[in-house]
Image: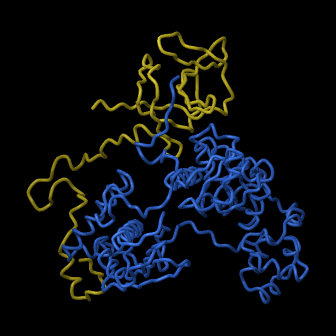
Amino acid sequence: MVYHFASLGEDHKDAAQFKVNMDTPLLVSCISTGFASPADDYIENPLDLNRYLVANPSATFYFKVSGSSMAELGILENDLLVVDRSLNPVTGSLILIVINGEICLRKLGLSNSQPVLQAFPKNQPPIISAMPDPAEIWGVLSSIIRKVL
Amino acid sequence: MYALVDCNNFYVSCERVFRPDLEGKPVLVLSNNDGCVIARSNEVKKLGITMAQPYFQIKDLVKQFKIQVFSSNYALYGDMSKRIMQSLSVLAPKLENYSIDEAFLDLHGFKIDDLYAYAHTLKKTIKQWTGIPTSVGIGATKTLAKVANAMGKKGDGLCVLIPEIVPFILSQILVGELWGIGRRWAAQLNALNIYNAEELRQQNISAIKKKFGVVLARTVAELNGQSCRAFSLEVEDKKQIISSRSFGKSVESFLELRQSLAYHISRAAEKMRAQGSVTTAFQVWVYGCQKGTEGRTAESELVKLPIPMQHTAQLLAYGEAALKKIFRNNWRYKKLGVVFLDMVPNFESQLDFFDQDSDRSSLLMKSLDGINQRYGKGSLRFAAEGFDKPWSMKRDRSSPAYTTQWTDLPRAFTS
């Protein structure tokens, strides 16, 4: 049952003070028993994959890969892509770009000091095409994630 | 100075971020149950389709002009809205999240010369980070920022209302178009030969206050550059939470009605716990009519709880008893809802001290909400909600939850 504090009156307040909430340990060891843990001085936050992979959460989106033609680059069908829209692409960036209304994965290359787009058809050399309107760039790939189980 | 950042055709723009093929094509979004139009692309506006127009009226136009129609996808719109507000909070010192697609920024301390460039940065950054186009209006007060935003929408989406041009701009706007002035006030003002916003601005504030009350007097002051509308940084805890929906098709059995009740109590209780409140009373209502007749009759029952509650199972027990009282055989029900009233903050920490039971039950609720947050709405729920939900709402044309469900992620094509 849930009780509203006010409904139980003042008497319970004192008795209540003796129970301590143990959900959030402030120290690794209990104070009352013997020696303090030598680790107490070195408590750090656990590693957080979100912080490792996502620099700007408001601008980060996830995609799944369709197609296996970029296997050579280590990108397989159904891989999870982390895409950061706030990054500016540079030569060598893997980018998502809108081509004929579809969101496609491509690589930004350089040819005769001009930026070009590289596509990777299966078992064929890359197709180089002129860089389209930068407004068509959807975002920049920042990580590729693959579960192996 | 204040800025108003307003997303252009927000729901349509959200759909287009993940469907770039729909850029430049007519797109509209329907309300819950696919009842009427609640968002239109510019192409749809040009066809003369109006806001809140019932869907059945425009089915021919939809066919003829190949309009892309979506059911509303609030999981997507809510997430995109959160991203926009977060992005703005990085760019502005103070932010008021005014609605799902609008935010006011307090720009005190900015130099006027920089304002246009600042507005441009806001618009460009939001577009790049989230894909959503916005309009930015800047003015001396929130009311003037609203005016500036409407002006901006007619051009490149940016407008800074510097004091020198305020009279001219206001003379171009009818009083009825101003923020907070409805049809009734507009008619009364017109009767006094006050037609445009500039004519209203020049009125004597105390005379307006006498005739129309303090709200309109504040608007006049705001048009004159005196800030009157409070800037609220924090979203206040809601004192009431409502969950209700029309049924996809009529419901006659108590069992189905009870499932719908369980669904709405679960949703409302989840929202209530999210803001850390407990409720002391709630109301259950239904709309329906006797079989063979038309029309809508409302029936409702108020439930007063013996103690404040937040546990779904307890609320369900009281809700079911209330529903039994108002349920009638031989009726067809069209809508059911619950509203939680008299909510108060949950003094859970104090309760934990002496009430072992409440400790466990609130822990259970915390786990329930945590699991649903992680694995998607309704992953874990009370069996009372039922399983196939024949009463659930019609959402035939909803797009995937691109940003909130692992199963719904958009695709990137390698060739």
Q: What residue is at 59 percent from the left and 30 percent from the top?
A: A97
- On the image, which quarter does residue B363 sit in? bottom left
Instruction: Give me the chain that's blue.
Output: B
In this rendering, is residue A102 above or below A47? above
Q: Where is residue B81 in the image (x, y as percent from the top left)?
A: 56, 54
Residue in front for this viewpoint, A52 or B390 = B390
B173, B105: nearer the viewer: B173
Q: Position of residue A20 (x, y in %)?
A: 20, 69
For this orientation, the residue located farthest to the left is A34
- Relative to A86, B124 lies left or right: right
Q: Nearer the viewer, residue B354 or B135?
A: B135
Residue A113 in the image: state x and y as whole percent.
66, 14
Chain drawn in yellow: A
Residue located 84% across and 69% down the image: B174
Identified at 39% across, 73% down, the residue is B277
Is the N terminus of chain B in the top left, top right, bottom left or bottom right quadrant?
bottom right
Task: Indicate whether B151 appears above or below B246.
Answer: above
Q: Which residue lies furthest to the front in this view?
A: B292
From this view, report whether residue B110 is shown above or below residue A69: below
Residue B198, by quadrant, is bottom right
